[in-house]
Structures are given as structure tokens and as C-alpha cells.
């Protein structure tokens, strides 16, 4: 792929990722993606012959990897896993508020509206949720928590964070995320083996 | 309103509620609503001159009230609030699985995709989330928990349940909901004043 081609492809993926995060799968049309991206219209079907579904999966891959990096960075710089989970909640609440409550989880909206119509979309999102959960679980195991308790706690923490992102968006207040962070930190602190 | 008119209106509301729950706001068009409902096409703008937004809000009202009744029924028949929360999670997990993982929270999908474009939709959903939270909180207060701890725990439980509904849908497994129920029950059992 030429450098210019790679740039066009990346612009399409970035624009799609932002639109999926803000408004979801069904509201996002190919014409809007091309307009937002600034990429030549012809590059769309050249790089994504599978159309919207293929482009959406590439965007979900990129967003999932980006949030994985955020989780990695916070986990890597925190003294204990409870602190890490609370920091993630604070970071997400501040980011959501700064975006005017438009930018929550980049996978969740599509996860609720489109996973029944595209198995490719569903498995892409499922894979990233599993990856995030594994990363949180690994940090708990490193702190001395047994593997099964760590897996359950990591899934529980992700569920709470996803739901708090929804409640914060609907209420236009980061409070549900901040409160969830404080309670998850306390809960992680109670796990045996720490 | 004539009896027949009332029936047409109700059919439109019910069909919209189901479609919003399964696929969200943007995927649901007026033609599909009319076709699914079996109501005469003319009744749509007669009863809902505000079109899709007005009809969606009526459907969200109906769904929010229905879930409130479910919460009431479970809370009213449970011995303690922790058991009630676990029972709700089990009920929701079984319902989600029985629907082929199409019917999760009737408000959440719209809450993520459409609250930035319609303030009427946003406030309708926010009102019902607050109502559900208040009902759970009141049960905790009745069990001896102080008002502020009860409010926080109720919001936390709703966040966890909403997120677990998302993870269960994406994973096509009720396990995240069942596990969330068990952990929330344990957590409620630890609250002071019980």
C-alpha cells in the first residue's frame, strides 16, 4: 500500500471509530464517513470491499486496541489494582464530560444495536471485551488473587464500568462513573490473597 | 379516544417498544413500526403527530414502567434486598437467553445512541433510571441502610446490571449477569445497618 493509500485508509478508520462511538452503527452512513474522513470517496471500496461492515470492524479493532492501551498504561503506573480501576473510572468520567457526554465506550453502542445482525461485528467486540477483562484479571493475579476470583472480579468490574458509562451519559453527569470507581476500589481491596 | 383507536395506539406503542429494545432508535423506521404493529397507517400521525420521537418516548415510557413493575414484584416477594437483586439478574439473564440474546434493557440501546440528538428521549430514559434506582434504594433503606449509602448502592447495582446485560448480549451467554447477581448479593449483604 502506498503511503498516501495508507493515510486514506487510516482516515476512514478513524472517522468511522469516532462516529460509531458517538452515534452507533445504524446512524452512521458511508457518505458521512467519507465526508468526515476527508479521504477520497474511491478509497472506501478500494480498501474496504466489504463496505460498512468491514469498515466498522476495522474501526472497532482500532478502538478496542486503543482502550487496551489505556488500560495497560493505567495498570502499569498504579500501585495496586483497586487504585487502577478507580483511575480508569475517573479518566473515563472526565473524558465523557469533556466530550459533552458524546464519547463513551467505543464498542458498547454497536454492541447493543448491531451484534444480532452481524456475527463479524459481534465477535470483534466480544474479543476486545475478553482482552480488556484478561488484562484486568492478570493484574489481580499478579497481586495474589486466585485465577478464578480474578476472572470473576475483572468481568464484574468491566460490567460496572460499562453500565456506569451508560448511566453517566444519560444523566449527563460523571457521578455514576466516579462512584462506581470508589466502590470497585473498595471491593477489589476486599479480595482474598491481596 | 374510541376503543378501536385506543387499541391502534397501544399496538403502535408495543411494536415500537419491542423494536427499540431489539435494534435501537436509528434502525427502527416508521414503516417497520406500522408493519409490525398491524395498526392502520393513518393512526400513526393521528395519535403521534410528533412522529418517531414522540412515539419512541411513549414506548420508552411503557417499557420503563414495565420494568419498574418487574422490580416491584421481585422486591416485594424477596426476603432481603440482596436476594432481590440476585433474582432480578437471574430473571434478566434467562429472559435475554430465551430471546436469542435480542431483548436486553429496553432503554439502554436508545440511551447510548440517541440521547445526544433528542433531549426528550434523554430525559424520558433518565427519569426511568432514576425511578428504578429509587425503588431499589427504598428497599435498602427499609432494611436499615442509611439513605446515602442506599442511593449509592442502588446506582452501583443498576450500573452493574446494565453493563452485565451488554456483556451477556455480546458474549451470547447469561454468565456475566448470573455472576453479577451473586456478587451484588454478597455486596449488599456487607452494607452497614443490615
Image (cartoon, coloured by chain):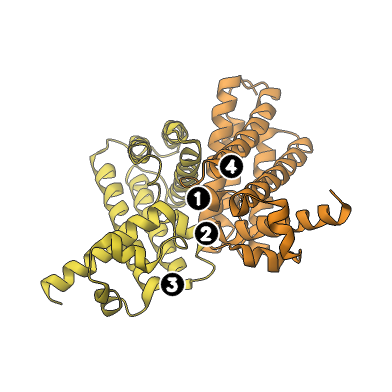
Chain colours: A orange, B yellow
State the mark number for residue A125. 4
Chain ID, mark 1: A
Whether discs 4 and 1 lie on one chain: the answer is yes
Label 4 and label 2: CA atoms lie apart by 16 Å
Of label 4 and label 2, which has the lower sequence position?
2
- Give the number of the mark in front: 3 or 2: 2
Residue holding disc 3: B120
The alpha-carbon separation of the residues under discs 4 and 1 comes to 11 Å
Residue tagged 2: A26
From the image, state whether disc 3 or disc 4 is nearer to you: 4
- Please, what secondary structure does the residue beneath circle 3 have? helix
Is label 2 in a helix, a strand or a loop? loop
Chain under disc 2: A
Which x, y percent locates residue A31?
A: 63, 67
Mark 1 / mark 2, whichever is N-terminal? 2
- Of the image marks 4 and 1, the number of the one nearer the N terminus: 1
Amino acid at each position: 500500500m502506498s503511503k498516501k493509500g495508507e493515510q486514506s485508509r487510516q482516515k476512514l478508520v478513524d472517522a468511522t471509530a469516532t462516529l460509531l462511538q458517538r452515534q452507533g452503527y445504524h446512524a452512521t452512513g458511508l457518505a458521512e464517513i467519507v465526508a468526515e474522513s476527508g479521504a477520497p470517496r474511491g478509497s472506501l471500496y478500494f480498501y474496504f470491499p466489504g463496505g460498512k461492515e468491514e469498515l466498522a470492524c476495522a474501526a472497532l479493532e482500532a478502538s478496542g486496541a486503543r482502550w487496551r492501551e489505556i488500560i495497560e498504561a493505567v495498570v502499569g503506573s498504579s500501585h495496586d489494582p483497586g487504585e487502577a480501576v478507580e483511575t480508569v473510572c475517573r479518566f473515563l468520567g472526565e473524558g465523557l464530560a469533556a466530550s459533552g457526554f458524546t464519547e463513551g465506550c467505543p464498542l458498547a453502542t454497536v454492541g447493543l444495536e448491531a451484534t444480532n445482525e452481524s456475527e463479524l461485528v459481534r465477535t470483534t467486540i466480544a474479543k476486545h471485551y475478553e482482552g480488556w477483562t484478561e488484562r484486568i484479571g492478570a493484574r489481580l493475579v499478579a497481586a495474589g488473587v486466585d485465577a478464578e476470583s480474578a476472572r470473576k472480579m475483572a468481568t464484574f468490574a468491566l460490567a460496572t464500568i460499562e453500565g456506569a458509562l451508560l448511566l453517566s451519559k444519560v444523566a449527563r453527569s460523571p457521578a455514576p462513573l466516579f462512584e462506581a470507581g470508589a466502590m470497585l476500589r473498595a471491593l477489589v481491596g476486599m479480595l482474598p490473597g491481596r
